[in-house]
Image: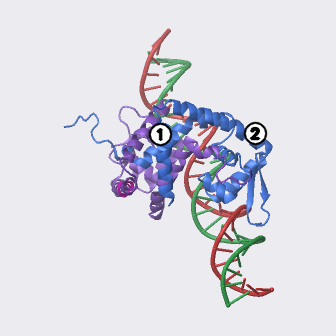
Chain colours: A blue, B purple, C red, D green
Amino acid sequence: MACDPSPEPRFIDGYLPYLLARASHAVSSEFHARLKAQGIGVVEWRVLASLSGSSGEAVGTLAAACLMQQPTMTKLIGRMALEGLVERHAEPGDRRIVRVGLTPRGAAIAAELTEAARAHEAELTAAMPDDQAGTMRALLRGLIDRSGA
Amino acid sequence: MACDPSPEPRFIDGYLPYLLARASHAVSSEFHARLKAQGIGVVEWRVLASLSGSSGEAVGTLAAACLMQQPTMTKLIGRMALEGLVERHAEPGDRRIVRVGLTPRGAAIAAELTEAARAHEAELTAAMPDDQAGTMRALLRGLIDRSGA
DNA sequence: CGTCATCCCATGCCTTTTCATGCAACCGGG
DNA sequence: CCCGGTTGCATGAAAAGGCATGGGATGACG
């Protein structure tokens, strides 16, 4: 009773949060490599994608959308502003809020990257049988909604 | 033609990698908070969970399993060794390899946390209708396998 | 109006990660 | 054997992130 080919599958291998993390990592890593080759970091891409098509988001809202903390976002915005990707403008009516919007250059890059992301996602879902992509999205949204509550 | 209740759903809201990242983040955040309250970081938990039930993993392998880079793992192992959670031993037959294993204390903490994780996962899946958890796991494994290739 | 609680973003300090590199240990072909 | 190529981990400087806190702007209430 020593030689087990697949004896006790480790706890972690069936642990749903771990599978989610692995899947998230695996699915994105290819695209992230492409980003890096282009000199853009993962977090910058998230900001660009979040702001794409938006007229401006508050710093805190943006941080939540990008799954990071507010001070991190403040600093990231600072760097991206230096690179001319985003700009801050004041919110008329509530001077506490700082709205972050894309510069034309940022918007151009965002559009380009978003297009690449679409293509990447298309490859991904094309490799999935049936309409698995649809059910996957539905299940993920369910998880997000339930956990957010 | 100004008031759109849900006009142009942003690209990102249907983007599968983003949904995965959000779901991963949402699902884990509650448990991560519990970890932090116990003085254990997320990365430490990953190492403990990965090593739980194992007789030792190489540093590089462990890093890949925990979705982090090798130098990060080397330093993390150093810290955890100082806390008496893990220990390094040499691999007989290949002195390049450093096997990382749990100390008794580390194993005890790992067992305890793993139990809590199981409970947390049970709550999570109990909230899911039908056998969604099963299909979810299958879909995620499919993504991981395809992307890993 | 004045005051206090609250909301939002910025900052500072310290920890952690990253990137590039160094270095030792194996491996294969002359 | 010896030697170039490869693998596996460690290290060091620089960038990024996390946590606690500061300070200005609002809003509610008396």
SS class of the residue under badge 1?
helix
Residue position for label 1: B64
SS class of the residue under badge 2?
helix
Q: Which mark is residue B102?
A: none
Give residue A83's position: percent from left, percent from top: 77, 45
Q: Amino acid at mark 2?
A: Ala
User: Residue at horizontal 37%, vertical 58%?
Assistant: B116
Disc 1 to disc 2: CB gap under 8 Å: no
Nearer to the camera, C20 or B45: B45
Give residue A136's position: percent from left, percent from top: 47, 42
Figure label count: 2
Q: Which mark is residue A108?
A: 2
Host chain of mark 1: B
Decide: few, some or many residues near mark 2? Use Cα within 10 Å; few <14, some 14-19, many ≥20.
some
Q: Magenta region: which residues?
A: B116-121
Look at the image and tell me whether residue B63 can be seen: no
Identify whether A13 is placed above or below C2: above
Q: Quadrant of residue D24?
A: bottom right
Host chain of mark 2: A
Side (left or right) of B60 relative to B106: right
Main secondary structure of the magenta stretch: helix
Mark-to-mark CA distance, 1 and 2 = 35 Å
Q: Is residue B43 magenta?
A: no
Decide: few, some or many residues near mark 1? Use Cα within 10 Å; few <14, some 14-19, many ≥20.
few
Q: Amino acid at mark 1?
A: Ala
User: Residue at horizontal 32%, vertical 41%?
Assistant: A9
Give residue C8's position: percent from left, percent from top: 69, 64
Nearer to the camera, D17 or B26: B26
Q: Quadrant of residue A121?
A: top right
